[in-house]
Image (tube, rainbow, N blue to C red):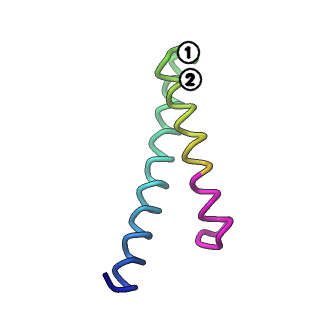
């Protein structure tokens, strides 16, 4: 695998993580609007949101994403 291919794959992963982060935030907002903040789905999405935030922070810490 060339360096360019490797970089392309890293950028694809970052794009996927950022897109999922937006999807999770939207889903959480829908559940909040429906007053379903005590559901298992809401709790699972909250945990996923935190995991994604941690992943994005790693990219930021390494200078691969602007804060």
- Where in the figure is residue 15, as x and y percent of width and height? 44, 61
Q: Is residue 12 left or right of residue 25?
A: left
Q: Give the quadrant of the C terminus.
A: bottom right
Say which residue appears at 50% left-offset and 27% top-offset.
Answer: 44
- Front in this rendered view, residue 17 or 32: 17
- Front in this rendered view, residue 35 or 2: 2
Image position of 5 with respect to 14: above or below: below
- Front in this rendered view, residue 8 or 25: 8
Numbered-mark total: 2
Residue tagged by mark 2?
A: 32
- Where in the figure is residue 38, as x and y percent of width and height? 57, 13
- Local secondary structure at mark 2: helix
Any mark on residue 25, and which? none
How packed mark 1 is, by other alpha carbons closer than 10 Å (few <14, some 14-19, many 20 or more), is few
Q: CA distance from mark 2 to mark 1?
A: 5 Å
Say which residue appears at 57% left-offset and 18% top-offset.
Answer: 37
- Where in the figure is residue 52, as x and y percent of width and height? 54, 47
Q: Are marks 2 and 1 in contact (CB under 8 Å)?
A: yes
State the residue lying farthest toward the front: 1
Say which residue appears at 43% left-offset and 70% top-offset.
Answer: 11
Q: Give the quadrant of the N terminus.
A: bottom left
Name the quadrant containing residue 47: top right
**In the rendered structure, which segment of residues is drawn in magenta?**
55-67
State the residue lying farthest toward the left: 1
- Local secondary structure at mark 1: loop
- Where in the figure is residue 21, as x and y percent of width and height? 50, 47
Name the quadrant containing residue 2: bottom left
Magenta stretch: includes residue 61: yes
How packed mark 2 is, by other alpha carbons closer than 10 Å (few <14, some 14-19, many 20 or more), is few
Image position of 16 with respect to 65: above or below: above
Magenta stretch: includes residue 62: yes
Residue tagged by mark 1?
A: 35
């Amino acid at each position: 695998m060339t360096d360019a291919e490797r970089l392309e794959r890293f950028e694809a992963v970052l794009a996927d993580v950022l897109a999922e982060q937006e999807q999770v935030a939207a889903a959480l907002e829908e559940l909040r609007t429906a007053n379903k903040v005590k559901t298992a789905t809401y709790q699972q999405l909250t945990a996923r949101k935190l995991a994604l935030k941690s992943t994005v922070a790693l990219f930021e810490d390494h200078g691969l994403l602007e804060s």
